[in-house]
Each structure stands twice: as structure tokens, then as C-alpha cells.
Amino acid sequence: MDELMLEAYHHATAFDGAWQDEVHLVFSEREKSRYRTTTERGQELGWFLPRGIVLSDGDALLCDNKEIVLIRAANESLTEAYSDDPHLLLRAAYHLGNRHVNLQILAGALRFPRDHVLEDMLKGLGIGVRAIDDAFTPESGAYASVPREHADAHSHGHTHSHSHSHTHS
């Protein structure tokens, strides 16, 4: 089969809802600017996107052969931290943010990739934790709050990676 190569990035609403194929990707795959995978129909797919774009569930990729590939957020192994006490959830969010953890914020709960060390920390704060399998859609961060339709026209090339390490004495 011919490899599909990305021609452009378009949000799914830019299309009439029709697509030819789809891919199911976990968050760590959807945040890559360069990636190769296989679609549901078994077609090889590769893309090269501007840095900072994170593919969301329902986004689409327009390939050089004009096929549209729909992006679906795949289920992944997550921890859900929960509490009826908003103050405890704020404390949990603070401590997870201090560790640069990707975090999905829900009413009464926080989700993040499974990590037993973080689970133990939260339990020590009095937060309930449970293992779940679900699609992960973390907060994009304050610098990504520009609406997507304006992001390309107003991009200034600024990115900030959180993959660095910190040491605290």
C-alpha cells in the first residue's frame, strides 16, 4: 500500500464529517509533531506537524492523496484522584503540577498517567485514587489557550518543553 503523507493539518470541523480512515492514539502519540503509525484500515501514516500542536479526539489529518484520517483518543491506563473536598483536590493539583504531570481536570477528580509513586503521595494527602482505562485529554496549558483557528496565523514559534528535570535541595 502507498504511504499516506501529511499535507496539512485541519480540525475535523473543517470537513463535512466524512473521512476515509481513522487512527486511535494515546496522548503521548497525539502530542508528537513527527510520528508514524498504521490506520485502522492498515495504511501506513506519517505526519510532520509544527511543534506545539497536539492532536485531539475528533481532529483530522489531510494526507497528500486527499484522504482524511480522523484522530481518535485511545483508552490508556490512568489514575483518577478524587475527593468531595475541593481544597484537597486543589492541593493534589498543586503537587502534581509541581512535578510537571500532564493533568486532566474533571468535576471532583483529576486524571493523570498511572504512577504508583504519585498515587502514594496523593493517598498520603487524603485523596482517593483508583485505576481506570479511558481516553486521556489533559489540560493544554496557559500558552496553548489561543483558539486553534488563530494559532497558525499568530504563532511566534515559542515552545516550552517540560521534559527537563528539576532538583530541589
Image (cartoon, rainbow, N blue to C red):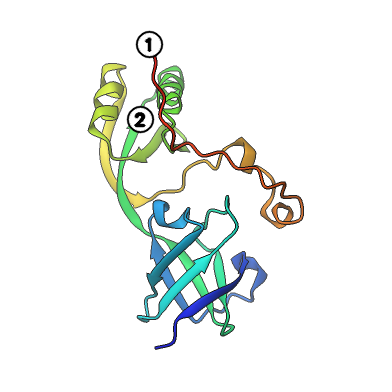
For this orientation, the residue located farthest to the bottom is: 1
Image spot of residue 9 (x, y percent): 61, 66
> Closer to the camera, 6 or 60?
6
Q: Residue at x 46, y 71 (%)?
A: 46
Q: Is residue 139 above or below residue 55?
A: above
Identity of the residue drawn at 44% across and 87% down: 2
Q: Are marks 2 and 1 in contact (CB under 8 Å)?
A: no
Q: Quadrant of residue 35?
A: bottom left
**In front: 51, or 84?**
51
Tell which tag, 2 or 1, sits nearer the viewer.
1
Residue 132, percent across and down?
A: 28, 45
Residue at 46% x, 57% y is 30
Residue at the top extreme? Answer: 169
Residue 140 in which image quadrant: top right
Q: Which residue is mark 2?
A: 82
**Chain-order first, disc 2 or disc 1:** 2
**Viewport quadrant of the N terminus:** bottom left
Task: Locate residue 19 relative to residue 2 in the image: left or right.
Answer: right
18 relative to 118 in the view: left or right: right
Percent x, y of residue 144: 62, 43
Amino acid tagged 2: Tyr
Checking the image for residue 169, the label placed there is: 1
Relative to 12, say whether 107 is above or below: above
- SS state under label 1: loop
